[in-house]
Amino acid sequence: MSIKTSMNLEEKFRETGGKRPYVQRLFGRIAGVYDLMNRLMSLGLDIYWRKRAARYLALATGETGLDLGTGTADLAITVVRQAKPGTRMIGMDIVPEMLEQGRKKIKRLGLEESIELRTGDAEHIDLPDNSVDGCCHGFIARNLTNLRQGFSEMLRVVRPGGRVVCLEITHPPGKIFRTLFYIYFYKLVPLLGRLVGKAPEEYNYLPNSLTVFPDAPHLKELMEEVGWSDVRYYYLNNGLVAIHVGTKPEQ
Ligand SMILES: C[S@@+](CC[C@H](N)C(=O)[O-])C[C@H]1O[C@@H](n2cnc3c(N)ncnc32)[C@H](O)[C@@H]1O
């Protein structure tokens, strides 16, 4: 079953001067409702998905990880809470409004010593080569202008032997489940966005951004092509999301 998308994304990107400004404006507008909408849209499953992603990152005591497109910092917080004491996270995002929400949450949880949030672009990471022990990201990959460039940058900043963990919505592999998921994602999510989030365009974009995103086997290929090794992926909840894990080869 193919679901007709209600929005021509290329046109929208052109109107705002490209995908990046469009994405920046979009997340700037929904920062205040972002966490609530995540819980509602996923029925709370997003909490469990981030826990699984944090486990695959597997940082050791005293190591530093990078969370790209950290947004309101939920993944960085999950990593720190599951990790051994002394583990640090740097969270980067291009949208100050999302980071502001994250900073408030980190302060409320008393995690200022463990998590530092910075403005920064995942496709041009402002960190030296081999400077972090691992890199993770949740639900940012679909938003990147150049996915290949993003994964190359991650490879550059992670030390040899370190991991990348990508948590992202995917195309479920089973036909029946995929059809049901598409109905939910393309029809109900925009409705929820309109009624609860008061952001109809924004919650139209989110599902439509999946349409052009590679399925899990192709994303694995792309990661291998840019140089990640031992790439594996795991479907969660019948393939609502996939977690890809890769390792930077030892030199
Ligand atoms: C769907 S949100 C995910 C937030 C968070 N990682 C989570 O797990 O909920 C995507 C985030 O990626 C950010 N983003 C998009 N493109 C980016 C880029 N090139 N560099 C850094 N952040 C980016 C957006 O501003 C937004 O905060």
Image (tube, rainbow, N blue to C red):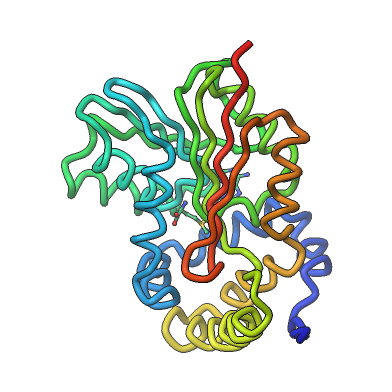
Residue at (75%, 44%) from the top-left corner? 221
- Image vertical order of residue 44 relative to residue 155, above or below: below
Q: Is residue 137 visible?
A: yes
Please say if 85 is above or below 20: above
**Horizontal side of residue 223 vs 246, given as left or right:** right
Q: Which quadrant of the structure image shows residue 241?
A: bottom right
Q: Is residue 237 left or right of residue 209?
A: left
* Residue 2, percent from left and from top: 78, 84
Rendering coords of residue 170 (x, y %): 62, 64
Residue located at (60% from left, 54% from top): 24
Residue drawn 67% across the image and 38% down it? 150
Q: Say which quarter of the image contains residue 41.
A: bottom left
Q: Position of residue 32 (x, y in %)?
A: 39, 65
Residue beneath the point at 64% across and 79% down: 178
- In which quadrant is the N terminus drawn? bottom right
Residue 170 against residue 92 in the figure, above or below: below
Q: How many marks?
A: 0
Front residue (pair 152, 25): 152
In the figure, residue 110 lies in which quadrant? Answer: top left
Can the viewer see residue 100?
no
**Measured from the top left, where is residue 50 in percent x and y?**
39, 54
Which quadrant would the C terminus be assigned to in this image? top right
